[in-house]
Amino acid sequence: MKTYTKSNELLERELKVSPLAAQTFSKSYRYFCKGISPAYIDHAKGCRVYDVDGNEFIDFICALGPITVGYNDDRINTAVKEQLDKGASFSLQSPIEVELAEKICRIIPCAEMVRFVKNGGDATTAAIRLARAYTGKEMVLMSGYHGMHDWSIGASNNNKGVPQAVCNLTKNFIYNDLTDIEEKLNTYKDKVAAVILEPIQADGPKEGYLQTLKDLVHKHNAILIFDEVVSGFRYALGGASELYKVTPDLAAFGKGMGNGYAISAVAGKKELMRQIETGVFISTTFGGDALSMAAALATIKVLEQPGFYDSIWKLGNKMHTGLKQLATKYGLEKVITVSGLAPHCGLSFDGTGSLSYLDIHSVYSQVMIENGILVFAICNLNGAHTEKEIDLYLDATEKAFALIKKAIEQDSLTGILKGGKVDPVFKRNIR
C-alpha cells in the first residue's frame, strides 16, 4: 500500500509560504484526492515518475504536455550538458538560436520568421500584439485557453485584477460553430484585430471548419492565429497546420518543443513578424536561453525520426478504443465521455443523482493513483510509452469504472472515497 508521509509533510510546509502549494494551477494538490495522492515528484525517467516517498507511477500527464520524447531522455540530456559546458546565457546572442530559428522555419507551415520566449502565454500575447499593431484594431475573438495575460484571462471567470476596459476587448466564440464566429465578426465589424483559437479541441475540427474560418477572418481583414501551445509537436511535427493543411497568419508554440525545458515561440509571416524591428516590443531576458534551445533542437531531432508520430497515434487509438469499450461495458456512457484525438485523449465526467462530476472524477482519480497511474482525465503520451503501459492504464481504468458504477448505484461516496475530493481551480459550469 502506498504511503505519502513526505508528500503530506512538504505540502503542509509549502501551503504556509506559497499559494496553492504549486507554481502552476494544474500541478496543485487540488487536482487529486488530498492525503492519498502524491504531491511532489522526486525524479522521472521515460514515462515513469517517482514521488518523494518512493512510489512509482506511470505518468499520463507528461508535465501538462511538455514531455513529448520522455522524461530524462539521454539524447536530450547530452545536448543540454554539452551546451551547459559552454554556458546558458550570454551578453550577446548565441549561434544556437540561429540554428533553432532556421529549423522552426523549415518545419512549421506558417513560419517565415520566429521569435522565442518562455511560456505559452508569452507566445500568444506576442501574437496578439503583432496582430493589433498590424491591423490598427483592438478587438480579439478567442476560443480555448491562451494563458494568464490580461487580454486572455480577462475574458474568463478568473479575471479578478484585470481592468474592465481590457476585459471588454476580448470575446469568446464557440469552437466548430461557423455561425457563431461569423455573427461575432459582424457584431464587431471593422474592430477585430485577431481571431485566435486552439485549432484542435475535443474531437478536433469538423471537416472544412479551419479553412472556412480562415476565409471569414480574412474577409473581415483580421489576423488568424493558431494557438498550438498544446497541439504543436504533439499531433504532428508541424502541428495542426500540418495535420489539417490550413496555414494561419501567426502561430504560438510551447510545451512539447523542448521536452520539458522552458521555451516557446511565436512564428508567422514576415510582414507581421518584422514589426518587431519597427516598434512592436517583444523582448525577454531569457528568450535566447541556450540550454532550452539545445533541448528543443535535440527534441525536434527525435520527433523527426520516421515512425515517431505513427507510434504515438497507434497507442492513443488503442487507449481511445479501450476506454469506449469499458464505458459501454459498465453502462457509464451518460456520466463518462471519451473524447480527444489519439495523442491527447481521455475522459470527461458528468454528475448523476446526488453525485457531482467532481465526485465521479474523485473516485476515478483515487483508483488510478492506487493502481500506479498518474493521470487527470485527458492523457498525454510520450515516446517512452508502449502497449504495456496502455494495458496497465486500461486495467486500472476498469477498476475505476467498476467503483464508479458502485458509487452511482448507492448514490453516495460513503465507504468509497478515502481522502479529499478533487477540487480544481478551473471548474466546469455544470453540477
Image (cartoon, helix red, strand yellow):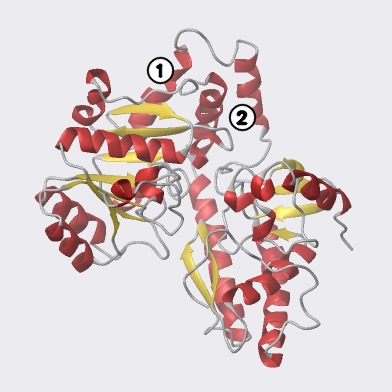
Q: Are marks 1 and 2 in contact (CB under 8 Å)?
A: no
Q: Is residue 272 left or right of residue 60?
A: left
| x 34%, y 54%: residue | 199
On screen, 373 above or below 321?
Answer: above
Q: Is residue 205 left or right of residue 159?
A: left
Q: Which amino acid type corresponds to the residue marked 2 in the rendered image?
A: Ile
| x 49%, y 48%: residue | 309
Instruction: Give the image location of residue 276, x and y in percent.
Output: 27, 23
On screen, 329 above or below 374?
Answer: below
- Work out which residue is located at the far top of the displayed protein and give it: 91
| x 15%, y 53%: residue | 215
Q: Which amino acid type corresponds to the residue marked 1 in the rendered image?
A: Val
On screen, 267 above or below 417?
Answer: above
Q: Quadrant of residue 113?
A: top left
Q: Name the residue under label 2.
A: 76
Instruction: Give the image location of residue 177, x and y in percent.
Output: 26, 67
Q: Which badge, 1 or 2, is on the more N-terminal residue?
A: 2
On screen, 79 above or below 22?
Answer: above
Q: Quadrant of residue 210?
A: bottom left
Q: Is mark 1 on a helix, strand or loop?
A: helix
How many labels, in total? 2
| x 40%, y 57%: residue | 156
Q: Mark 1 points at which residue?
A: 98
Instruction: Give the image location of residue 223, x and y in percent.
Output: 20, 43
Q: Can you say which quadrant of the picture contains the N terminus? A: bottom right
Q: Distance between the residues labelled 1 and 2?
A: 19 Å
Q: What element carries label 2?
A: helix
